Amino acid sequence: MSNYVPTDLLIEILVKLPVKSLIRFAAVSKSWRSIITSAAFIASHLSKGKNHTHTLIHTLSTNSLVKFTGGVPFAVNSPSKLKFPYYESDSIYTRIVDSCDGLVCLSNNFFIIDFAQSPGVIWNPSVRNHIALPNPAINPEDAYISVLGFGVDAGRTHHKVVRFLYCRNAAGIFTTRVEIFSLKTWSWRRLIGGVDISLHAYLSLYFRQVFLNGVVHWLIEQEPIGDNSFRRSYILAFDVGDEVFREVMLPEWEAGGSGFAKLSIFVIKESLGVVKSTGESCDVWVMKEYCVKESWTKLYT
């Protein structure tokens, strides 16, 4: 009997295997390595991986991660504990920025920037490997606060980290500087004419981002201007491929102000969603057609 396995059949078998196994099999032969490292195979493997759900829970008490495998949150199989791969300190402020295609971006910065420390880490939990992001060649002396975002372009070929720097001048006024790190070129560069976000909106940027179809989203709440108590809220969107910022409007109820309501955004079935909650009620909305304000539809109340 021949030991020959047709290439098409081999690919069909390999594409179903986990990353850890593929790394081992890439050492079998040059032809296997060529298949496993090809752009077409990687894209196919990533596409199939979308059917597998993994939930990461960060436990602050031990600064570790617990990974659950299952189709429904907390209906899980075989939880496993993963230690944070952080590189310099076990800060309680270590956080998960986001994950794309099996890569997890971690940040260890909170308020004051320490330029002696890497601004973040890219981690692959499947193979337990990580690498610290290099510091930009030039760091502004007046930089005070740093916030990271993470995503990949719509073609899923170019992963990038976006960094917001809040710089404080001698008069105590904050301005925003945006920098982009490319995992493809492994280098930083400044994004000129990026976006100007008030310092108040920093907390929204820091604590939550959602990624959808090549675009990173943050829920922004601008601070009131003058005697006006109204806080304008919107979704700030960053296209990872085009490197362009734009605003995505919230449902019509936001036009009158959210008052003491808490807002949060999420992704559901490839659509953008928002939750508005108060002490008395909770509304869930979904945007049926991306970037079309009129397509916001209330699902639950």
Image: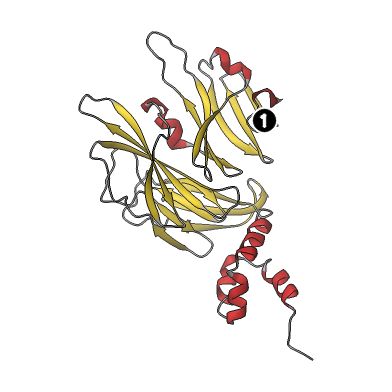
Q: Position of residue 230 (x, y in %)?
A: 47, 13
Image-based side of 65 in relation to 3, left or right: left
Q: Residue 130 appears in which quarter of the rendering?
A: bottom left
Q: Position of residue 281 (x, y in %)?
A: 62, 20
**Residue drawn 67% across the image and 56% down it:** 47
Residue picked out by circle 1: 286
Asked if 189 appears above or below 292 in the picture, the reply is below
- The residue lying furthest to the right in this view is 1
Q: Is residue 111 visible?
A: no
Q: Position of residue 20 (x, y in %)?
A: 56, 68
- At label 1, counting other C-alpha atoms closer than 10 Å, the crowd grade (few under 14, some 14-19, many 20 or more) is many
Q: How is the image coloured?
A: secondary structure
Q: Position of residue 158 (x, y in %)?
A: 52, 53
**Residue drawn 28% across the image and 39% down it:** 112
Q: Residue 21 appears in which quarter of the rendering?
A: bottom right
- 10, 129: nearer the viewer: 10
